[in-house]
Amino acid sequence: MATIGPASDSPAVLAAMQDAGMDVARLPLAHGSIDEAVARLRRVREAAPEVGVLVDLPGPKIRTTAFPEGGVNLVTGTEVDICPQGLAPHSSEERIGVSLPELVESLQEGDRVALGDGGVALMVEKRDGYTVRARVLAGGKVQGRPGVTAPATRLSLKTPTPEDIERLEVLLAEGIESVAVSFVRTASDLETVKSLVGREVLVCAKMETPEAVGEMDDILRVADTVMVARGDLGVRVPFEDVPHIQKKLIRSCIAWGRPVITATQMLESMVNSPVPTRAEVTDVANAVFDGTSAVMLSGESAIGVDPVNAVATMARIARRADLDFDSHQWSRNLPIQHFASEGAGSARITAAIGAAAWRAAIDEKAAVVIACTNSGATARAITRYRPPCPIVAATPFAFTARQLTTSWGVDTVLVPAEAKSTDEAVDNGIEAARLAGYAKPGDVAVVLAGSLHDPTSPVTDTLRLVRIY
């Protein structure tokens, strides 16, 4: 997954990023107008038609006013004023404007304030009217309009914001596949968005608050996908807790059958460098070993010196890690996963059929698992098991194919039309997978198909082992 920004906006770069390995384009709405976002979305559709799109609602993020072009350096030990944006429409080394005046009013002596991803930290020392004086605890370069993080007890902000909803309504008309909700705290935050987008659009919970971590299971019950947003999370919880939260979230998402995205600072040095650090390479590979469904580029592809190289580099690391991904060890650990947590009867049937398909793929040394699916649910059902052979989703809908780009290990093939029967769906899926080169004569394919009786409650209830002729 790659974030799209000024460095990756052109059709030529977008097409090259798709060729380099970009499966999903993340469109952040925190910067620019809604008209610019619509234009960017259309460019992605035109230049990279096979790529899925995740629209990222900014939520109630508090930002500084703009720093001068090229940024400024805040020096450790120096003092700086923090004030409402009306008193500082532009930020500098001496004075930082904040977009939400109520935050400045709530700050107290001793409060720690972080800028951006937390690399720059300030400590409030005293108040002078509407302004507070702070000392720079950890200095560094700040540019653009970085986010501002203060103690959670100072403000209680709700997500989605009215502005989020306005933007979302415009983008829904463009046929988006997925939307991410920022600063989720409770499951009700997601339910608000799900009521707006309906059943077809996937809703992603960005886990970046300690409240969300505490409500993990309730949120996963509602979420369609999850993002481990390590940047904002790391300034809200002790940074030494972040790796443990990441691993717990990945395990929990797999138990619930939810695609999970590991994000933020994965190849951060590639914002300015043509090669990553060895620590960053290891970070990406370890996320793959942990079972993450997707890994994400942020500034590396949005504002970096070479977005195409960043995508190609991350793809190389992920492919190499996949070669050593221990599917059989994963299989041995599956009994401890909480598959019984699936609630509805249709979901429990789908989980049971998925487990049987995984077992059959291993026992029969299958060449491919073929998931015949209209909505994508059948393909997502098998991905939690991380089988050792390719998963091919056979679907008549390009929309579904783009949604499945977030799911672990799923390739897609388009079949000619929506099947009239389960037999037709199975035959179409086998033929499409064979023509695409996923199976050859003599191979065994494990084929999954969903019930066609009730499209409002999809259930995967058919499993077949087929020898290819």
Image (spheres, helix red, strand yellow):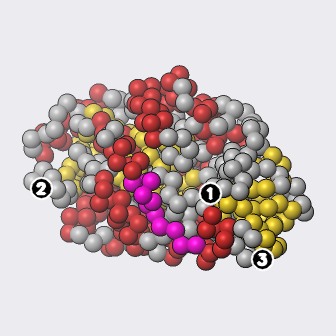
Sequence-wise first label, 3 or 1: 1
User: In this rendering, would 60 be left or right of 448?
Assistant: right
Sequence-wise first label, 2 or 3: 3
- Which mark, residue 325? none
User: In this rendering, would 350 be left or right of 213?
Assistant: left
- Which mark, residue 99? 1
Residues drawn in magenta: 155-165
* Identity of the residue drawn at 75% across and 71% down: 129
Secondary element type, mark 2: loop
Percent position of residue 439, x then y: 32, 34
Residue for badge 3: 110
In this view, the residue in front, 430 or 87, is: 87
Task: Name above or below for residue 381 compared with residue 237.
Answer: above
- Amino acid type of disc 3? Gly
Sequence-wise first label, 1 or 2: 1
Foreground: disc 1 or disc 2: 1
